[in-house]
Image (tube, helix red, strand yellow):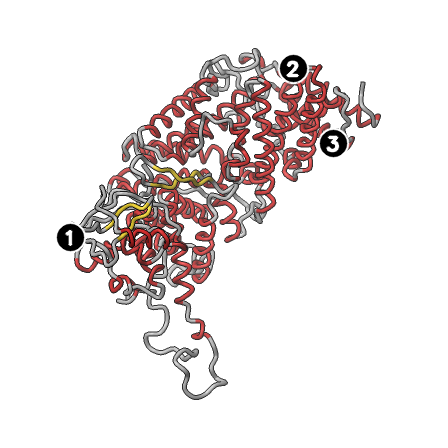
Amino acid sequence: MHVFPAEIPAAEARRADVVEVRVARKVAPLFGLDGDIPPFRRSWVCDYTELSLTEIGRGAPSPDRAERSRLDVTRPDRAPGTSSTDGDEPEWMWAGRAVWFRRQSSLSGTLSNATLNRYGPDTKAAAVLTAANRLLRGATAAVSEACRHLAGSGCDEEVRLAVWAGLVLEVYRAQPALVVAAIQARQVQRSLSARWGMQVDRAGVTGTDAPSEVHPPTLGDGDSSVGDGPAARWRPTSFEVVDATLPALGLADDPTTGPGLVTSDALDDIASAWCHRLLGVGRPGRGVVWMTEDARGSRHVHAMVRVGAVVAPFVAACLGASTGGRMAPPTLPTLPDVDVLTAVSVQRRRAYLLTAHLAANYVRYRDELLQDWPQLRASTRDLVSTAVDRCSEVLDADDPVALQLGAYSSYLDVWDLPRTGHDASPVAFDGGTTDNGASGWTPPMRRLVASQERVLRAWRAGHLDPGAAAYLLEVGIVALRDAETTWSLHTEPAGPNTGMTSPASVGAWWSAILEARGLDPGADLAKTIDSLSPAQTFHLHHYAAWLARSGRRGDLRQALTLQERVAAVRAEVTRREPVGFAAKSAAARASHELAAEIATELALATPERERGARVRALEVAVRHARTVLADPSTSGLLRPPVAQPATLRTARVLARAFCTAVANGLSVDTRDAAATVTLLDAVIDNERTDGQTGGGGRNGQDGGDRHGGRRSDTALLATLRVWRTELAGFCDDGRRPS
C-alpha cells in the first residue's frame, strides 16, 4: 500500500468527463497501474518515448512490426483470453507480453483517432498528461492542502520547499513510471506551446506575414492551456501535482501579501527543476528503482529513496540554501489539531502528517545544520513523535503513514542515543536510570527491534510498499548496530548482552531488504556485483558491514569485494553532485573507511603461512585508509564537538589499519601517520576529559563509573594511546617502528 496511489476512475462518468476518464483508463495499465482493467487485466511498464498513439488508444502495447505482419498473415485461431465479434477470427490475442489486434478491429472501448486528435499540440503528450492529472487528482488535492498549511504555519521557507518536494517524491514512489511519463509529456507540451515570437520587437518590419512567420499577437494567441478556457483541457501543459501545488507554499511575490522569497516567474523554473530531478531518481546516490512482475504477468515499478539525499541538493540549487548565512535554526512545521485532521479525507491526513517525516529527514540530512544547532535533533524527534500520536487518533494502525512514522520515530530514538546530551553514555543499558534521570538505552532499543518486526510483517501483509519497507529496515539495522558498537567501546563486558539483535534476526531483516529491492537474498552478491546496477550497489554498504561482522574469512572476502565496488560507486556520486553536502561526502568517506576496516580484519584472519594474501589485504586497507584521510569531510571530524561517534570510529579504523600494516612490514607515509595522530589526539583528549569530569557525552553530562561502569574507557584509551605512540614514533623517526 502506497501513501498517494493513483485512483483509476470508474468506467461510467458524466458526459463532460467521459473522454478524460476513458483516456485515463487506457493510460493507467501502460505505466504499471492496476493491472485488472478489462479486457486484458494486465499492466505493463512502457517507455513513453517508444509508445505509439495507437497503443494508447487500445490500452496495450503492440508487437513489433515483423511479429504483427506474421500474425496478420497466419490469421490465428481463437485462443484463450481473446475475444471475437464474428466467431471466425479473434479481435486480439497475446503475442508474448504484447497484444496483437486484428486489422480493422472494432474491439469495444478502443479510443478512436478522432477522439484522441482533439488533444494537442502533441496528441500523445497531451493525452498522457491529461490521464496522469486525472489519475493523480486525489494526490494533487492532498499535497496542495498540506502546502497551504505549511505556508500559514510560519515554517521556514527552505523547509517548506523541501517538504513540498518530498510530498511530490512520495507521489512518484507510488507510481514512478506514470510520473516519469507525465514529466516527459509536460516537457513536450511546453516546448510546442511556447510562442517565442510574441516577445520579438517588430518595429523594423512592415507588411503582411506568411502564415508560419512570426506575427504580432492577436486575440486568442498565447498559451491557451493556461487558465480555465475551453481549450485548456485539450492542450494541457501542466503536470498538476507539481505545477498546481508549488504556488500554495507561498514562496513567491504576491500582490496581497507582498514580496516573497522568489519572483512569480521563478516558480515555473523551480517546478521544472524538480521534474528534472525526479527523472534522475534511480541513479546512484538518488535511490533505487526496480521492476517486479506478479503471478498474472502484471509489471510494477518500486522505488526506495532517502528524502534528504534527493531533496537537499535541489533546495540548495533553487534557494542557495546554506548554513553560512543563517542566524538561527530553521523553523519546523507544526501539525494540525486532531479536529482538523478528522474533518478531511484520508489522503489529506496522510499529507499533513507526512510533513513531519519529510521535514525531519531533510534537516537531519544537513549535517552542518545539526552541528551548528544540536537542538534540532530533539526538535525533529519531538515533531515526529507528535505526528505518531496524531496517527494513532486519525489513521488506522496499518496505514502506511502510521507505519512509516512509527518506525522512523523508533529509529530516531536509538540513532540519537550516542549523539545527544546525557543519553550519549550507555550507562544504564540494563534498563536502569542515571542519577540525572536519563533513561537507559535498553527501552528504545527494544522498541526499535519490535518496530523492525512490525515493518517486516506489514510489508509481507501488503500494508507497506517494498521501497518503504527496505528503507525502514535498513536504517533500523544501522541504528541498532551503531548503538551496540558505541556500547561495546565504553562498557564492560564488551558488547551488550541483551539478545535483542541476534544474528538470525538481523539476517532475516537483510534477506527481506534484498528481496524487497528485487535481489535474490540467497545469492552470493560478491559474485554478481558487476551485474548489479550502480544504484543497487550504492546501497549495499551496510549489507557489507553486516556480512563482515561474523569475522569468518569467507564472509570477510565477500564483504570486501562488495565494499570495494560500493566505495567506487559512492566516490563517483560525490564527484558528480554539484552541491557539496557533508552527508554526501561522508557517504563516500564511510565507504572507504569500511573497506579499510574489512581489509584489516581479513588480514588478521589470514594465517601467517599465507603471508602473501595477508599483505595483499593490508595493501588494500592502507589504500582505502589513505583515501579517507584525503577526503575533505575528514577534516570536519575535528570540528567541535569532537566527541561525535564518527570521529572515534574513523580514528580507530585508520590507526588500526596503519599499525597492523606496519607490524607486517608494510610502509606507511609519514604524512598519513601524522594525520591519524591528529585524529587520535582529538579523541584521546575528549575521552580523557570525559573521564575526569564523569561526563557521558559532548555536553559533559554525568555518566561515569558510579552509574554502572562506562569506564572500560580505560582499556579503550590504552589502545588508542598505544596506536598513537607507534604512529608518532614513526613520524619522528621516519622509519617503521620496531
Looking at the image, tell me whether mark 2 or mark 3 is earlier in sequence order: 3
Q: Residues within 10 Å of mark 1 (few under 14, many from 20)?
A: few
Is residue 422 visible in the rendered structure shown here? no
| Residue 385 pos. (x, y %) | 39, 32
Element type at mark 3: helix
Which residue occupies the foreground of this view, 22 or 417? Answer: 22
Residue under pointer 3: 672
Q: Residues within 10 Å of mark 3 (few under 14, many from 20)?
A: many
The amino acid marked with disc number 1 is Asp
Taking the image as shown, residue 627 lies to the left or right of residue 483, namely right
The amino acid marked with disc number 2 is Thr
Which residue occupies the foreground of this view, 384 or 358? Answer: 358
Element type at mark 2: helix
Residue under pointer 2: 714
Which residue occupies the foreground of this view, 535 or 686? Answer: 535
Taking the image as shown, residue 616 lies to the left or right of residue 333, namely right
Residue under pointer 1: 86
The amino acid marked with disc number 3 is Asp
Q: Residues within 10 Å of mark 2 (few under 14, many from 20)?
A: some
Q: CA distance from mark 1 to mark 3?
A: 82 Å
| Residue 214 pos. (x, y %) | 43, 78
Q: CA distance from mark 1 to mark 2?
A: 89 Å
Q: Are marks 1 and 3 in contact (CB under 8 Å)?
A: no
Element type at mark 1: loop
Is residue 388 visible in the rendered structure shown here? yes
Q: Nearer the viewer, mark 1 or mark 2?
A: 1
| Residue 592 pos. (x, y %) | 62, 32
Q: Quadrant of the C terminus?
A: top right
